Amino acid sequence: MSLVRRRFLQFLLSVAAVHVVAIGAYYLMGVGRLPERDQRIFAWVWMGATVAAVLVGLQRTKRARRNRSVNNRP
């Protein structure tokens, strides 16, 4: 498996892991029964964690693609 494909797979799995953890925390903490303000805070934290995972994953994938194109030049 190429490095680019591996990085992309890691990217997808990290975003999925963020969602699995957040959904589990949502139900374990009973966020649906909390006041609306606390639900909103939970949602913002979840969104922030997702954005962070996406940005890191995209950067790593982009870096792997760049390295591949640099290494393949004659």
Image (tube, rainbow, N blue to C red):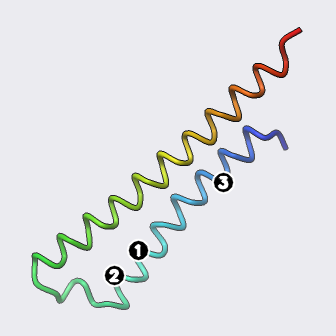
The numbered mark at residue 68 is none
- Residue furthest top as drawn: 74
Q: Secondary structure at mark 2?
A: helix
10 above or below 71? Answer: below
Q: Position of residue 37 (x, y in %)?
A: 10, 75
Under mark 3, the amino acid is: Gln
Query: Which comes before the other along the chain, label 3 or label 1?
Result: 3
The numbered mark at residue 10 is 3
Under mark 1, the amino acid is: Ala
Report the side of 18 relative to 72 (left or right).
Answer: left
17 above or below 51? Answer: below
Marks 2 and 3, how far apart at CA: 24 Å
Q: Are marks 3 and 1 in contact (CB under 8 Å)?
A: no
Report the side of 67 relative to 15 (left or right).
Answer: right
User: What is the crowding at mark 3: few (fewer than 14 residues within 10 Å), some, or many (at least 20)?
Assistant: some
Q: Are marks 1 and 2 in contact (CB under 8 Å)?
A: yes
Q: Secondary structure at mark 3?
A: helix
Query: Which comes before the other along the chain, label 2 or label 3?
Result: 3
Q: Which image quadrant: the N terminus?
A: top right
34 above or below 62? Answer: below
Under mark 2, the amino acid is: Tyr
User: What is the crowding at mark 1: few (fewer than 14 residues within 10 Å), some, or many (at least 20)?
Assistant: some
Residue at the location (30% across, 67% down)? 45
Q: Are marks 2 and 3 in contact (CB under 8 Å)?
A: no
Q: Position of residue 2 (x, y in %)?
A: 82, 39
Disc 2 marks which residue?
26
Disc 1 marks which residue?
22
Residue at the location (61% across, 33% down)? 62
